[in-house]
Amino acid sequence: MSIDPKVSLRGLYKIFGARDKDVLPHVRDEGMGKEALLAEHAHVLGLQDINVDMQAGEITVVMGLSGSGKSTLIRHLNRLIDPTAGEVLVDGVDVMGLSEEALREVRQTKMSMVFQKFALLPHRTVLQNAAMALKVRGVDQPTRHAEARKWLDRVGLNGYEDRYPAQLSGGMQQRVGIARALTANTDIMLMDEAFSALDPLIRTDMQNLLLELQDELQKTIIFITHDLDEALKLADHLVILKDGAVVQQGEPQGILMHPSDPYIEDFVSDINRARVLRVKSVMGPLKGTDFAGDVDIRDNLESLIARSEGDTTLHYRVMDDGTPVGELHMRDLVKALVPRLSSTEAA
Amino acid sequence: MAFYDGLFNTLGLGDWCKGSESDAPMSMADLLAQSSGEEQTGAFFPFPSLDNLNESCPAILQSRDVTKGIEEGFLAAKPGLKAFLDPITQPLSWLLDGALWTFSATPWFIMIPILVAIAWFASRSVGVTVFVAFSIFLLGLVDHYEVAMQTLSIIFVCTGISVMLGVPIGIAMSKSDRLQRALVPVLDLLQTLPTFVYLIPLIFLFSVTESKLYGIAIILYAIVPVVRLTDLGIRLVDQDVIEAANAFGMNSRQKLISVELPLALPNIMAGINQTIMMSLAMVVIASLVSAPGLGVNVLRGIRNLELGVGIVAGIGIVLLAVILDRVSKAALSRVDMTRVKH
């Protein structure tokens, strides 16, 4: 990789229990599994050998079922949880080596966090909540309130500044949570199941809001979710966790087209492939002529099916910012929609 | 011949027993036995109490030596304790005397409006305020205004000190599991110890003419709930919010002031309400050790069998209790408003 990752995790292990350091060799060197560790040493294996690079300006989504260690993982980035072994590098600096003072400095200026249960201060107004990070940093009140107002406006909470969190709906409370993180003006945003507590319609709204903001701000976002649709919608880089270990990571389209593991095949078999897959993943090199039309490389297949009205004989020219980069035949598109064999057998 | 003679002889302790023949004065039972001129025949199998063992073996202490020992130990420690405790508790005497003087020196036509105003600002409730004004008026009508004010002034001072000491202790307890483990038994003891028992060591330490004597007794008894509920309140603060505070880099002081204390406030207020009620309970009992106020009249009622005096004072205490409870509860629910929809 040419540019250094913004955040990277190197050989991260987390074992929960009083003697975590003592039992670490069993896991790291002898390959003891989660069940065996619990049965023989009464320690719980949280994370094992996590190596993930998170690039600046990208949304890295960490996905896994409950108990897979995803919330544990995100709390290592700002050391709300201390790892048993391994490195957490932020801008090339190992967070593990920081003094308490320096760690607080990093938490104040480099990362902000959005929580599943919003975690707003109930006795403070929306405006005061949004300005919280700046207040911690010692910014004077007019400045921090102006900044907080700006971001509250941006997330669509204009006019709610003087309400209390309990007076807002869940979706609006989470907007306050996002405004609070944005007001902190940090490069890195950690989002721990930020939309999981919201109902589906509002969740879609919030996902769109996040993508819109990301287009504009280019933050480094680490997003945790258990919802594959959400993961595929948001991710530039997708990391799939199972029992505390990374099963597969990479570009989401790639994972969808080439799942490396029956676990992931099962996972991806349930989703609407046409909505998630994009032209880029199924197009071929530019050869033919006589195209039925031009499509954008970022279009999803569902829109293309609608456009072709189900006619599988057509083929389209694929455009990327006005230049032709390949072609797509509707027959290939239909093939791409067929899930991989093993999972259909399983189903 | 006492029952346990055989035992000591078998154990080979006969010489040790006789070696230190006790010259302690005879017990009442011995005296009675002597005067009746016949050997007392004890029970068939007496309990091996100190007194019974002493009959067979004079080297063993008698029970009265135990109580005497405690008393002597206490008296021996008294000068040291007093030298240490006297200076640090002296301000309590000044405060109590000062408050008593202020409450009784302020004329009623100034004092009552002040109290009603306090009730209004604390509760913001018309009903509560009117009730407070009416109750004080009623107390004044039966010439109990002055004693009621004495009781009230003692409660103000003692509750204030309990909160000033109790909240920091509660905060420290919530931060340290070890301190909590150490203090909980002490708090349990303070709460279960019969209220009269508090007074015994205090009477020895301080003179009954000093107001700090009852001040200390009231504070020791009333401080418990505010300590407990501050500890509990801070421990119950939503961990998600604490995590958020950590994630945004708050230090422990910022966390305490802007997150933990505000979120624990409803619990702390409930503790203060309990502390006020317990001060009131104790101030009545403390009239035994010269605490002025309504309790004195209750005591007079008991001592002199003046039924009416006792009952009027008792009703006065109930009125005060209801006033204090309503005002502090109303203040509590006002504090709690930020948590519910409004």
Image (tube, helix red, strand yellow):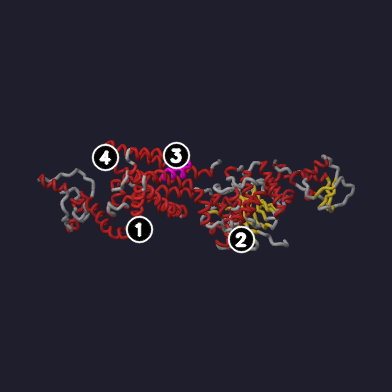
Say which quarter of the image contains residue B136.
top left
What's the CA distance linking mark 1 and mark 2?
Answer: 54 Å
Q: Chain of mark 3?
A: B
- Residue type highlighted by circle 4: Ile
Give the labeled residue for mark 1.
Answer: B88
| Disc 4, SS | helix
Q: Quadrant of the C terminus of chain A?
A: top right
- Residue type highlighted by circle 1: Ile
Q: Nearer the viewer, mark 1 or mark 3?
A: 3
What is the x, y in percent for residue B20?
A: 18, 58
Q: Quadrant of the N terminus of chain A?
A: bottom right
What's the CA distance linking mark 2 and mark 3?
Answer: 61 Å
Going from the N terminus, do you reach mark 3 or mark 4 first?
Answer: 3
Region rendered in magenta: B114-128
Q: Chain of mark 2?
A: A
Say which quarter of the image contains residue A144.
bottom right
- Residue type highlighted by circle 2: Glu
Q: Nearer the viewer, mark 1 or mark 2?
A: 1
Give the labeled residue for mark 3.
Answer: B128
Give the labeled residue for mark 4.
Answer: B302
Q: Are marks 1 and 3 on the same chain?
A: yes
